Amino acid sequence: MTAKSQNNTAQTVIVVGCVIFAVLLLSALIINLIKLATLSSRKRELETLMASAEAQIAALESDITLKSSDEFIDSYVREYLDMMGKDEKAFISR
């Protein structure tokens, strides 16, 4: 082989190597962009679920506050448990 053909062969190997490297980089970039899009979509779903859960928690906390009040407990036991307050007498109509 002459020096010129060796030089052309080396250039060809370098060009092919650079093309393969570029293809690998491009495919890695595409794969990472797809993963990023998928994760961004999942993040939005989870943020929506979290907002819904927080709203539900707030509603339940207000319900707990209401049902913990003395007025609610008093009305509940009178209505559903047929209990009376202290110093009260029940009148039964016949």
Image (cartoon, rainbow, N blue to C red):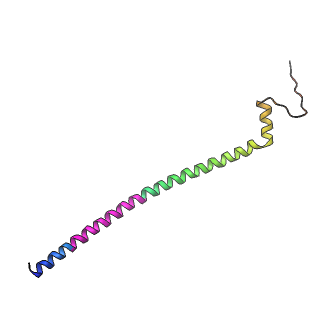
Residue at point 80% right, 40% down? Answer: 71
Write the start and end of the magenta stretch as one range. 14-36
In the image: residue 73, left or right of residue 31: right
Q: Is residue 90 magenta?
A: no
Is 15 contained in the magenta span? yes
Looking at the image, residue 69 sits to the left or right of residue 91; the answer is left
Q: Is residue 60 above or below residue 47?
A: above
Residue 49 lies, in percent from the top left, at: 55, 50
Q: Residue furthest top?
A: 94
Assign the magenta stretch its main secondary structure.
helix
Q: Farthest residue in the left direction?
A: 1
The residue shown at (78%, 38%) is 73
How many badges with numbers are in the image?
A: 0
Q: Residue at x 28, y 68 (%)?
A: 21
Question: Which quadrant does the N terminus fall into?
Answer: bottom left
Residue 68 placement, left or right of 24: right
Residue, far bottom: 3
Residue at 79% x, 36% y: name it.
Answer: 75
Residue lying at the far front in this picture: please name it.
Answer: 1
x and y, in percent, of residue 94 in the image: 86, 18
Residue 58 left/right relative to 26: right
**Quadrant in the rendering for residue 78:** top right
Image location (x, y in percent) of residue 2:
9, 80
Q: Quadrant of residue 14?
A: bottom left
Q: Is residue 92 above or below residue 71?
A: above
Q: Position of residue 83 (x, y in %)?
A: 82, 30
Snapshot quadrant of residue 36: bottom left
Q: With respect to residue 82, does 70 lie above or below?
A: below
